[in-house]
Image (cartoon, rainbow, N blue to C red):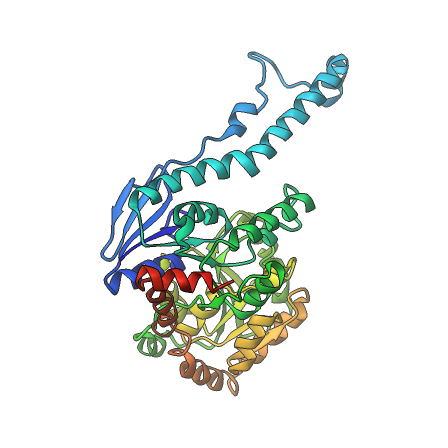
């Protein structure tokens, strides 16, 4: 059977999509992943169990509407510039408003439409039996490819429209518009999949669709971690590790502030990269118990964590409902690395951490609370017990178990046409 997967990243740093493609390819399906291209990648890439085909990215309309400085002009002071252009203020305002309007139209209409069209063209040519979309930005392409057959699986990695709440470029109207589009398109989906039961319940209530099935975002079972944990360099210091992207709303500022309250034998290590790395480094400068490590390859994240850290940290701040119900990759990467976890007191994190007794939760907006959780997890009388509890659940929260759910979903869609079509009609 032919399976076509749509994703809007470049399929190089998305472990969930890679796992899905490898799993379906391993059981004999022909799998094609369709995604955009960048300058450093090939149009077509053949991997062991699946093929990647990349499509042309959309043209940046911002470059077309960006104001140009006149040739030979010198930037005067703001006062002089204002005086010189006082008679042109109305034209400048109009041009600025037009530029903003065009950029907004491009962001919400032109860019998605172009990408959808290129993905649809490749997907339709491939003529798959089952289409699998990832998040809202690929859903329309999947709906157009599947059409009346309804052989479409949608994987909601998160509450996609809600991730933009609080961003200046996305007002309430834009969020409402995205939710409306998502609700309409989800009614054309055969099976909805998501990463935890809290997001599944929210999608079910919000859009009145059949409750999504949960396939946890977990990595493969790491058989070598016990050995590597024993080989970790023995020191008197405890390492508390944050591993991931340095960006906003991850709680990293408060995590660094928590260094003031850490025990004398605890060091905070931040490993990764991101847009606010410079600000974080400046914030951490006064703290001798905080250091930054460079990023590692995606397939080395778990082994790097196992060999350097004693505790993993997930400090997400619930700035919107998407963050509140978050199911971060790093949570289960820490588990596969054999590390106890301290994380924000959010529904899914609390369920996994406290439900399995593998760590502690904290208030992500209170540095002292963060430090108290880290200190408690790294004490000699507690750390060995937490590690043993982690090792007990590693198989349960591994892809070798979760992949069975994905395989079952696809096998249901592989039934004879008449049976599958009757099943689709009964879904709603």
Residue that appears at 60% across and 74% down: 361
Number of marks in the rendered image: 0
Where is residue 188? Give x, y as percent.
49, 53
30 or 91: nearer the eye? 30
Location of the N terminus by quadrant is bottom left
Q: What residue is rendered at 39% in x and 38% in y?
A: 118
The image shows residue 255, relative to residue 176, as above or below, that is below
Q: Residue at x 73, y 14 (%)?
A: 88
**Quadrant position of residue 48:** bottom left
Residue under the point 26% across and 46% down = 45
Does residue 299 appear anywhere in the picture? no
Q: Is 191 placed above or below 68 here?
A: below
| Residue 203 visible somewhere in the drawing | yes
Q: Position of residue 342 (x, y in %)?
A: 55, 73
Q: Position of residue 229 (x, y in %)?
A: 36, 76
87 and 9: which one is in front? 9
Residue 390 higher or lower than 210, as above or below: below
Which of the two residues, 349 or 226, is positioned nearer the viewer here?
349
Left or right: 254, with 415 as reference point = right
Residue placed most toward the observer, 298 or 405 = 405
Q: Is residue 225 toward the left or the right of residue 76 in the image?
A: left
């Amino acid at each position: 059977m032919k399976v076509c997967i749509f994703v809007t990243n470049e399929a190089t740093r998305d472990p969930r999509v890679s796992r899905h493609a490898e799993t379906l390819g391993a059981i004999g399906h022909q799998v094609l992943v369709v995604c955009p291209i960048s300058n450093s990648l090939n149009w077509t890439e053949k991997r062991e169990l699946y093929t990647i085909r990349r499509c042309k990215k959309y043209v940046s309309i911002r470059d077309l509407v960006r104001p140009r400085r006149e040739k030979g002009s010198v930037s005067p002071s703001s006062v002089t510039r204002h005086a010189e252009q006082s008679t042109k203020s109305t034209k400048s305002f109009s041009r600025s408003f037009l530029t903003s309007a065009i950029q907004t139209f491009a962001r919400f209409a032109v860019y998605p439409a172009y990408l959808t069209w290129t993905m649809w063209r490749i997907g339709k040519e491939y003529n798959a039996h089952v289409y699998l979309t990832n998040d809202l930005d690929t859903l329309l392409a999947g709906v157009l490819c599947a059409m009346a057959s309804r052989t479409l699986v949608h994987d909601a990695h998160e509450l996609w429209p809600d991730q933009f709440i609080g961003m200046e470029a996305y007002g309430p109207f834009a969020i409402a518009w995205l939710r409306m589009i998502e609700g309409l398109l989800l009614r054309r989906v055969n099976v909805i999949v998501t990463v935890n039961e809290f997001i599944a319940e929210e999608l079910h209530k919000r859009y009145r669709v059949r409750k999504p099935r949960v396939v946890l975002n977990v990595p493969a079972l790491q058989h070598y971690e016990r050995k590597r944990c024993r080989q970790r360099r023995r020191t008197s210091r405890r390492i508390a590790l944050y591993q991931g992207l340095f960006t906003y709303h991850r709680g990293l500022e408060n995590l660094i502030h928590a260094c003031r309250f850490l025990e004398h034998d605890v060091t905070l290590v931040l490993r990764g990269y991101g847009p606010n790395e410079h600000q974080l480094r400046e914030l951490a400068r006064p703290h001798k118990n905080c250091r930054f490590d460079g990023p590692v390859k995606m397939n080395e994240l778990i082994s790097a964590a196992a060999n350097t850290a004693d505790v993993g940290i997930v400090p997400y701040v619930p700035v919107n409902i998407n963050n509140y119900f978050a199911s971060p990759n790093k949570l289960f990467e820490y588990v596969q690395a054999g590390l106890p976890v301290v994380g924000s007191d959010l529904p899914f994190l609390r369920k996994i951490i406290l439900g399995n007794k593998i760590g502690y939760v904290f208030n992500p907006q209170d540095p002292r609370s963060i430090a108290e959780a880290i200190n408690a997890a790294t004490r000699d009388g507690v750390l060995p017990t937490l590690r043993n509890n982690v090792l007990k659940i590693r198989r349960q929260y591994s892809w070798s178990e979760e992949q069975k759910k994905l395989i079952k979903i696809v096998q249901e869609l592989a039934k004879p046409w008449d049976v599958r079509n009757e099943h689709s009609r009964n879904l709603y």
